[in-house]
Image: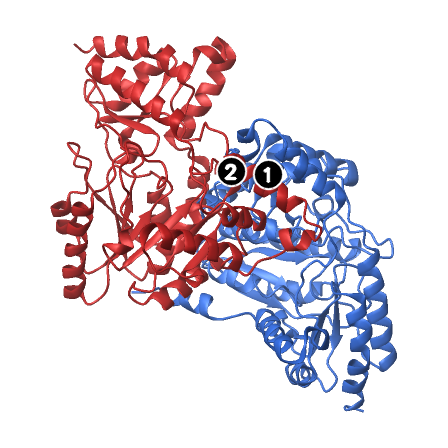
Chain colours: A red, B blue
Amino acid sequence: MIAQEMYQLGASRSCIRELFEYGLRQAAVVGKENVYDFSLGNPSIPAPEEVRQAFSQLIAREDSLSVHGYTPAPGSMEARSAVAADLNKRFGADIRAENLFLTCGAAPALISVIRALAVEGAEIMAVAPFFPEYRPFVESSGAKFTVVPADTQTFQIPVAEVEKRLTAHTQAIIVNSPNNPSGAIYSPENLLALGEVLTRRGAEYGHPIYIIADEPYRELVYDGTEVPFIPNLYPNTVVCYSWSKSLSLPGERIGYVCVPDQAADSKALYAAVAGAARALGHVCAPSMQQLVAGLCAAVRPDLAAYDENRKTLYEALTSYGYRCVRPQGAFYLFVQAPGGDAQAFSNHAREKNLLIVPGGDFGCPDFFRASTCVSHDMILKSLPIFKELIQAYK
Amino acid sequence: MIAQEMYQLGASRSCIRELFEYGLRQAAVVGKENVYDFSLGNPSIPAPEEVRQAFSQLIAREDSLSVHGYTPAPGSMEARSAVAADLNKRFGADIRAENLFLTCGAAPALISVIRALAVEGAEIMAVAPFFPEYRPFVESSGAKFTVVPADTQTFQIPVAEVEKRLTAHTQAIIVNSPNNPSGAIYSPENLLALGEVLTRRGAEYGHPIYIIADEPYRELVYDGTEVPFIPNLYPNTVVCYSWSKSLSLPGERIGYVCVPDQAADSKALYAAVAGAARALGHVCAPSMQQLVAGLCAAVRPDLAAYDENRKTLYEALTSYGYRCVRPQGAFYLFVQAPGGDAQAFSNHAREKNLLIVPGGDFGCPDFFRASTCVSHDMILKSLPIFKELIQAYK
């Protein structure tokens, strides 16, 4: 007999994945160059040269077991120390190697933290728009997933709406900044206001309410905007990170959980994260990738190509009459759908081989997401279609 | 508030890990060369040269995204096709790429299969001696873990004991051959007898009882012994594999689940495995490791060093009067503890800086495990201690 919940999770595809696969099929019919695929958040710039050098250097080592052997479950001390040093240098933080737990990317990092907090009756909150996988991550941990509706004017966290939804069962709120899909970066004022509410209500309930800071897009920032290091603003913050986007290594599955000392019950929470990881089958993160992350802890991506794509698409779309908050980070545009129904709009676009993701699964059914981690040439060729599509609604 | 079950899993250490860490501390006191550490199952031979070449070749590729980019969740088609072709060639099987789901090693492979079968009230069985992590894998999936006591004369599967413990709730039995810790390889006759019972009782209960074949030691075999490919003997078999031991890549986290077409409800089970993996935070297995596994699908390890260790330790220990079945596979010796209490014996050995793992967590409290994936020199130097220890019991 087969567990139906698992079957459903495996048999159902995300709408992003479905669109992408439609694009591959359609490319076979009309030619790859005639499909304008804005569906995936897959880095389009190569890994930095330092990454290649780090891999080469490791593979050249005489002693292959020092590269490919088991590391302790939390990860290589050498790699964790390098990452901690980089965080401390950049953010004036006080992170030690012992606060870091290296994982197979951000997904198991998030799930480990969620499970570490998934006590009986737990509620975990997310602010729309949010990464759709948060829902199965929370629900398959036995916790209740609570959604805070988006402030679609600013895409900052609507703190009053958060407060309305807090209950004595709320264990954590997932905060994703720079945000997928809106590209918003939550301001220090916004985060401090959130922290104030969480502190006050946590005291009232008699237990901490954690921020789970999901930060795969931390280094993907434009216009010189700063991304606040949330543990500096609210102590009960656990950070989940991935090098997928920053070093263009999405397939390599390397990320971390950081449980800073100042977080309430820091040591017990770290142990519970380790325990949850163990229950997920974590043995260690891929060892060579750990060492590469350590060697490249201070390497930042060259964002020129993403920035050019962002500007071109943002300026063209707004000039055609689309409404969209200018993204400050990540590599997406989140655009209000003409006509108000993003699913219908995405369907129309698909008829013209333009693949954009309707925002329903992100908690914003009237917006669509267009990835800007694509070729600049494809963007230029797609513009007449975007223009034509909105004209039909005027 | 912190989930206590997760905290316990994270705060408690396996006795293997505890011994290993004791050894590191003791080495700092008495010198590394004076600690005889037989605790870990960590490959001691380097990765084959073909592995290094495969990594080098991938890193030299111009297009880094074709190496480091996301693959589909089940894995690169190129890699899966190569692995399927190798299985078919060796075992006359009929595995397609679509039957394989690449994972971050054997642990998440096993957990994905267990969760795919963990319906309400499910029982999952293991035969002693068994890998101790099976217990948390099963119990954290909500299923009941049932242990079949070992046949310590032959270390084959005691089929009558299995049959006594089957119930209408039994969903699967985990079969680990070559076995950690006994080194036994279950014979075709033994597996056919098991299959006959599972077929008969499954028909009675009205649902299949799967074999979950945990095969990380498949290629670690001595004396020309053959390891049966269990799907050829019992159709409802799902195979979990890892390249950790065979290619000496334990840190790199690459393995697979194989759900052959002939397994009952094959497609639904595969989907449920994929769904369970998604709930565990699986996005894809490390992409470079996938490609290396594909490129090295036909590479087999050079076992000369393990074989020499096995012979030396087996012959010496049995000549001193220890009782032990000669291991045919893996890289362990599983030895009856003089005095009958392996915990006490391990404690005595530890006082002499000899680290051997008591078998309680493996389901055999009167046996200890000694890893033979160690240096030959260390084995030779440890022999007088083994001799002295047993003399105290005569």
Q: Is residue B323 visible?
A: no
Residue behind mark 2:
A251
Residues packed near mark 1 inside 10 Å, few (<14), some (14 to 19) or many (20 plus): many
**Which residue is painted at 16% across and 9% down in the image?**
A394
Q: Position of residue A316 (x, y in %)?
A: 27, 15
In the visual, does A326 lie left or right of A353? left
Residue for badge 1:
B288
Looking at numbered disc 1 in the image, what kind of residue is underneath it? Met
**Marks 2 and 1 in Cβ contact (< 8 Å):** yes
Compared across the picture, whether B140 is left or right of B364 comes to left
Percent from the top left, x then y, of residue A79? 51, 54
Which of A303 and A282 lies nearest the eye of the viewer?
Answer: A303
Residue B31 occupies quadrant: bottom right
Residue type (three-letter) at the residue carrying disc 2: Gly
Residue B107's place in the image compared with A29, above or below, is below
Q: Quadrant of residue A237?
A: bottom left
**In front: B41, or B258?**
B41
**Where is residue B140 shown, x and y percent of the image?**
46, 60
The residues bearing labels 2 and 1 have C-alpha atoms spaced at a distance of 8 Å
Name the residue located 50 percent from the left edge and 35 percent from the top edge: A48
